[in-house]
Image: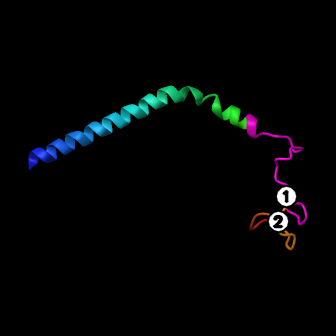
Amino acid sequence: MTTGTAERSKNRSEVLVSEAQARRDFLKKAGRFAAVTPPAITLLLGTSLNSSAIAKSGGWPGNGWGDKNHIHVGPPGRK
């Protein structure tokens, strides 16, 4: 019975080692993009306010596509 337990423990430890190695290999390959990706995403997400993709809500009724029967005054606790 101990042989089966020892064998399962050995197999489990081999799986953990192979997963850790796979993770390291991935980080080696993908890590080079870490310095480039955040500025690129920032550049893509930074738009002028003239873009039609920006939500049309300024917090007042009639400026958005939703319900016009109430007024948004800002975050809770803010006056």
Residue 64 occupies quadrant: bottom right
Q: Amino acid at mark 1?
A: Ser
Q: Which mark is residue 25?
A: none
Image: magenta residue range: 43-64
Question: Callout 1: helix, strand or loop?
Answer: loop
Residue at image mark 2: 66
Residue at image mark 1: 57
Residue sitting at x 15%, y 43%: 6
38 and 5: which is toward the camera? 5
Residue sitting at x 78%, y 65%: 78
Mark before the other along the chain sequence, 1 or 2: 1
**Residue 72 x, y percent position in the rendering:** 83, 67
Q: In which quadrant will I find the C terminus?
A: bottom right
Query: What is the CA distance from the residue labelled 1 to the residue labelled 2?
Result: 9 Å
Residue sitting at x 86%, y 44%: 51
Q: Is residue 35 left or right of residue 57?
A: left
Q: Is residue 36 left or right of residue 45?
A: left
Q: Residues within 10 Å of mark 1 (few under 14, many from 20)?
A: few
Closest to the camera, between mark 1 and mark 2, is 2
- Kindly check if marks 1 and 2 are in contact, taking CB atoms under 8 A apart as contact: yes
Q: Residues within 10 Å of mark 2 (few under 14, many from 20)?
A: few
